[in-house]
Amino acid sequence: MESELNNLHHIPLPPKQLPNPTTRDDRPLLNSLSISTTTAAASTDELEKKFAAFVRRDAYGTMGCGELPTKEKVLLGLALVTLVPVRVVLAMTVLLFYYVICRVCTMLSVPNREEEMQEDYAHIVGWRRIVIVQCGRALARVMLFILGFYWISESYRIPNSNEKSSTQEDKHEPEEMGRPGVIISNHVSYLDIFYHMSTSFPSFVAKKSVAKLPFIGLISKCLGCVYVQRESKSSDFKGVSAIVTERIREAHQNSSAPIMMLFPEGTTTNGEYILPFKTGGFLASAPVLPIILSFHYQRFSPAWDSISGARHAIFLLCQFVNYMEVTKLPAYYPSQQEKDDPRLYANNVRRLIASEGNLILSDVGLAEKRIYHSALNGLFSQC
C-alpha cells in the first residue's frame, strides 16, 4: 500500500476521472487522485486545489522545501546556532522538571484502570492533584513562552443570534446550566495542546504509543488521557468511544472531574479550513465549550499541516516571535433534537466555529491528508 501511494504521481488519469472537490466521493481514495507528470510545479498546483486545507502558504513553501531568499537563509543560520540550542535546553528542563513533579505526586498511588492500556492518575485528589494541575498549567505556559509565544491574544465572543441555525433559535436555556463536559476546538498544530494545558488542563485522546513514551507517558496519564489505536479497525474503538462518553458525562456532572478536550476533526489543517467533525464528543449529549485557535505569521506558519515533525520543530524554534489568537465562545447547550442526533449536534457546532472563526468548511479528512502527503513525498523526494 505504501509503495502504491508513493508512486501515485507516475499514474496519470484522464480528466473525466477527477472527482468534484466539493462533494463526497465513495470510490477508493487511491483511484481518486490525479497528478500530472509533466512538471512538479503543475502537479503541486493540482494537488493544492484538491487538498487546500493542508496547503502551506508561508515563505518556506510546500513541505517547508521552498527556495528561501538570502536574507531568510542568514536569519535561519543565525537562529540555528544561537536561539535553537537555548530553547531546546530550556524546553527539556521544563519537561524534566514537570516529569519529576508528576513522579513525586504519583508515588505510592495506583493508577485508575478502566481497561487494558487505559490507566490514568487523574482520579488523584487532595494536594497532589492540585500540585499536578497548577504546575502543569504554569509550565505549559512557560513552554509556550520558550517557543516564542510571549503573549497570547484571548477574546470572548457571543455569537450573533441572527447567525444561529434554526435548531438554536428555538431551544431553551436549561434551568441548571451545568458545566460543559468537553472542550471542542479546531486543530492546527501540536502547539494547541500546550495552550489547552495552560488554561484548563483537560484530558485528551491520544495514541496508545504516547503512554509508553519516556517522560511524556507519565505526564499524559496525569492528564487523564484516553488512549486509542488510531490505525486499528477492531472493536477497540467502541470501548474507547464509551470511555470518552463516560468521561464527558462525568465532567458535566462533577466539577472536580477533569474536563475532556477533543479535536473532532481528527487531524490538523493549515488553520484556514475546518474539516468534518467526528461525533464521539457529542454522543454524551452534554454541553460543549467551543474554542477557536488561529496562528498569525509573517515568515513561518506554526500550522502542522504538510511538513515533517522534525522540520517543523526546527523552523519553529528558529522563529523568534510566534503569534497565537484564541477566541472563546459561550458554552453550547444542545437542543433535544441535537441530543437525539449526534451528527446534527456535531455539524451545528462545526458551523458555529466556522462562522465565528472565519474558517472555510472542507469535506476532506485524515485519509485524504495521508494521500496528499504521500504524493508530496514523491514529488519532493530530494527535500
Image: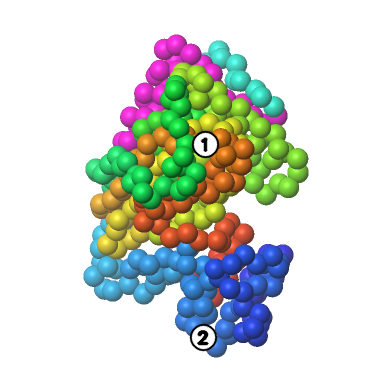
Say if 227 sits above or below 69 in the image. Answer: above
Residue sitting at the far right: 234
Q: Secondary structure at mark 2?
A: loop
In depth, the one of 369 and 78 nearer the eye is 369
In depth, the one of 211 and 31 nearer the eye is 31
Q: Provide residue 260's location: percent of width, then percent of height.
A: 50, 32
Placement of the N terminus among the 4 image quadrants: bottom right
Q: Secondary structure at mark 1?
A: loop
In depth, the one of 240 and 288 nearer the eye is 288
Check if mark 1's residue and mark 2's residue have beta carbons within 8 Å: no
Q: Which residues are magenta?
A: 116-145
Q: Which mark is residue 335?
A: 1
Which residue is painted at 56% across and 61% down in the image?
364
* The magenta stretch spans residue 144: yes
Q: Which mark is residue 39?
A: 2
Q: Earlier in the sequence, mark 1 or mark 2?
A: 2
How many numbered marks does the figure carry?
A: 2
Q: Is residue 382 visible?
A: no
